Amino acid sequence: MSRICLLLCLASIFLVQQVASSSEWSYICQKGNCLKVRAEQKESAISLGACRLMCSSYASLWPKPTGKMEFKKSLIQLNVNSIDVLMPGEDTPVKRLVSAAAQRFKKNIDLLAPENGRKPGGRSLVVNLHLKKTGSDKVVYQQDETYSLNVSVHTDGRIISDIEAENFYGARNGLESLSQLIIWDDIRSEYQMLDSVYLKDGPVYPHRGILLDTARNFISTDSIKRTIEAMGASKLNIFHWHITDSQSFPYTSKSAPYLTKLGAYTPSKVYSSQDVDEIIAFGKVRGVKVLPEFDAPAHVGEGWQDTGYLACFDKKPWQKYCVEPPCGQLDPTQDGMYDVLELIYKDMIEQFDPDIFHMGGDEVHEGCWDSERKIAEWMTDNNYTLNEAGFIKLWDKFQREALKRFTKQRGYDVPIILWTSTLTDEKYLMKYLPNSTYIIQIWTTGSDKQIRVLLENGYRTILSNYDALYFDCGFGSWVADGNNWCSPYIGWQKVYENSPAKIAGKYSHLMMGAEAALWTEQSDDASVDGRIWPRAAALAERLWAEPKSTWKDAEDRFMIHRERLLKFKVNADSLQPEWCRQHQGSCSTDGILNMP
Ligand SMILES: *[C@@H]1O[C@H](CO)[C@@H](O)[C@H](O)[C@H]1NC(C)=O
Ligand SMILES: *[C@@H]1O[C@H](CO)[C@@H](O)[C@H](O)[C@H]1NC(C)=O
Ligand SMILES: *[C@@H]1O[C@H](CO)[C@@H](O)[C@H](O)[C@H]1NC(C)=O
């Protein structure tokens, strides 16, 4: 670097700081809203970030905490180069998780600010984690995720934050909240945080998820990781991986590799064992459990062509045999098919170590099985009638044997999730699906009477009602003209207001939670972030807090959270003009809209 450049470069940094430490604009807090105003004194202007910490409800935490929260409206400068996250005890798997979570905590704080022009100085931050259980690092279904967080300034000047939790996953939630109490002040060019906070917090529902379909279109591991990163930041905890379907088989089965070789879109559009391991590990650090789904007997196709176990594959016209092309269903009459199924289960069990598993089981089409002569003959020979009752019996045969093979590989019983379907209709439900084994994931509308039937009969349920939680709705159709089947687009407000407790009424104890679903017929790496985010964060607060208040009370914090996700390199969709963010409470209205 030449001397002249050195001088010029220094001069330009100096200039930036001069400009940055005073501002034409400031923010004032008015009825819980931060409003942009002309600065009366440019040198003491308040940044938007600082205003939000002190003015927004819950210091702008997302999701909002469910327990007591107290904080002083005073900020202190933080030295980001001096942050320590400490936990006593020797090197254990949990301790390794803690250090990975600590690294992520620091990295995400670092991402809040531009690399250049940070003013030096500020206090050190010491985070002490106190975990009651430090033995296993397994992400257990329905585990304790509560924590308490206490921030105060020690007499020696350091900022001390104590986080108490039952286990790593609760402590991690505490770290997440703490990171949201730290902001970048773009007027002073420094990090600031609240200096006195006490908070007790924990989720209402144990199952808070996102379903991602990686078979209709392939989703790269980087995109999956971005999704999980944003889940961690929003305290969602279940990544439901719809990993295969009739269009492609990107999952690498160690025991039946031909399924992947034949079934993947291209040799590079596969998830290697290492990819899967990495995603699972990435999830753990972020408190996210990866829950695999192997959907069957429908929703299979590519990959299975050479097995002889595939019925009606790519049969036309597809409308007669399935709900979208290409058609395909497993042939339940062939014993060899269950052997292949068992190999897939074995691989998945080895890799995911599941304490809960998803078997899909949706959209089985009579027309498909009926169209295969050998299946119809087998049914006749075995006294199955060739009508709905007979096909349901055949489906039941499949489900029973599939469960048996899964349980044999797992070695013990785990809860099994199935989608709502004809099999979960009132007339078949109790006969075929024991309520002790099966959890039913609801994808009909939130007002469907089937929900009541499930709950009255003691089934635990997970809500993915398509009228509020299918994020693929509201785009053009891909099989005809016009809009796609579940249009219109679902706004975040509707997602936020979709309350499992309201839908379940007196049976809300049977609601495990909900999942937002992104079926990817019409999205891939290019659009996956924007389809899911920030709407899934609206679900996150609904499930974490089950608030009595409406979306309007959450709007300002929601928009702040969207900004956070952008900082973490998640391309969360834009929902309003930036002006509304700078003038909180000035845009949304209860009145009649006069839109052009
Ligand atoms: C928070 O920590 C400070 C400093 O250790 C302590 O004085 C205070 O009692 C703690 N608050 C709560 C509610 O535990
Ligand atoms: C089918 O029903 C007939 C008549 O009731 C009976 O003789 C036969 O054994 C049955 N076959 C099977 C496979 O159950
Ligand atoms: C679950 O199913 C069993 C067996 O059909 C039934 O007796 C029981 O009442 C059901 N549980 C609940 C909570 O309804």
Image (cartoon, grey):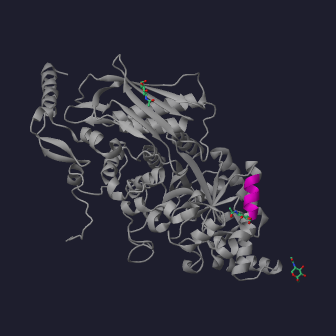
Residue 68 is inside the magenta segment = no
Quadrant position of residue 384: bottom right
Judged from this view, the residue extending furthest toward the left is 40
Give the residue displayed 59% in from the left and 72% down from the top: 450
Q: Image quadrant of ligand 1?
A: top left
Residue 401 is inside the magenta segment = yes
Quarter of the image that includes the N terminus? top left
Q: Is residue 308 visible?
A: no
Give the residue displayed 43% in from the left and 52% down from the top: 541
Q: Nearer the viewer, residue 62 or 9?
A: 62
Q: Is residue 348 left or right of residue 243?
A: right
Q: Is residue 327 left or right of residue 60?
A: right
Quarter of the image that includes the C terminus? bottom left
Q: Is residue 271 visible?
A: yes
- Vertical arrangement, residue 33 with respect to residue 404, above or below: above
Q: Nearer the viewer, residue 488 or 251?
A: 488
Q: x, y percentage for residue 277? A: 58, 42
Q: Nearer the viewer, residue 253 or 186?
A: 186
Main SS category, magenta section: helix
Give the residue displayed 20% in from the left and 53% down from the top: 579
Give the residue displayed 23% in from the left and 59% down from the top: 587
Q: Is residue 71 left or right of residue 9?
A: right
Quadrant position of residue 187: top left
Residue extent of the magenta highlight: 400-407
- Vertical arrangement, residue 263 with respect to residue 583, above or below: below
Judged from this view, the residue extending furthest toward the top is 156
- Vertical arrangement, residue 578 with respect to residue 14, above or below: below
Q: x, y percentage for residue 291? A: 58, 51
